[in-house]
Amino acid sequence: MKKIALPVVLVSALALSGCVISIDDDDFDGDYYPEHTSWQQMERENREHIAALVLGTSTQSVIDEMGAADFNEALQKGDAQYQVLWYRTQRRDGDGITTKDECTPLVFKNGELMGWGDTALQNI
């Protein structure tokens, strides 16, 4: 019986051993932006682009520079057409979902940048 038990224990130990894979939360939180190496880099780049914006810039120029927005809304109010592009600039929850409270709104009136941030949005 002892002669059989030792090989069974050795085979079991070898069969049950395996590789350990460590996942570092700092590099991946479920968000996926293929054009950026990390969500932190993407947010930093968006903040830098927004800080360099000039009022009156066309909607298309901003999209060409910053890429597709995380959210895009438009409305007609009187004779004016408004468009709001939301770009992610800060992390609130590590849930892998981008929400508007993690974004900065860029507000366009008739195709030109009229402002950004909550104040610009409230003035529509």
Image: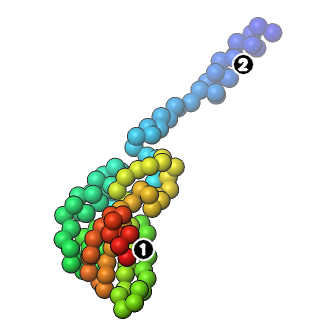
Can residue 67 be seen in the rendering of this structure? no
Q: In which quarter of the image is residue 72?
A: bottom left
Which residue is pictured at 27% across the width and 71% down the height?
Answer: 115
Q: In this view, does 39 lie above or below 115?
A: above
Which residue is pictured at 28% across the width and 53% down the height?
Answer: 44
Q: Distance between the residues labelled 2 and 1?
A: 63 Å
Q: What colouring style does the render use?
A: rainbow
Which SS class for mark 2? helix
Q: What residue type is labelled 1?
A: Asn
Neighbourhood count class around disc 1 (C-alpha, 10 Å): few under 14, some 14–19, many 20 upward: few
Q: Nearer the viewer, residue 107 or 23?
A: 107
Q: Nearer the viewer, residue 16 or 103?
A: 103
Which of label 2 and label 1 is nearer to you? 1
Can residue 101 be seen in the rendering of this structure? yes
Residue 86 picture location, percent across and down = 38, 67
Query: Residue at label 2?
Result: 8
Comes first in the chain, label 2 or label 1: 2
Residue 103 picture location, percent across and down = 39, 60
Q: Which mark is residue 72?
A: 1
Neighbourhood count class around disc 2 (C-alpha, 10 Å): few under 14, some 14–19, many 20 upward: few
Residue 106 picture location, percent across and down = 32, 70
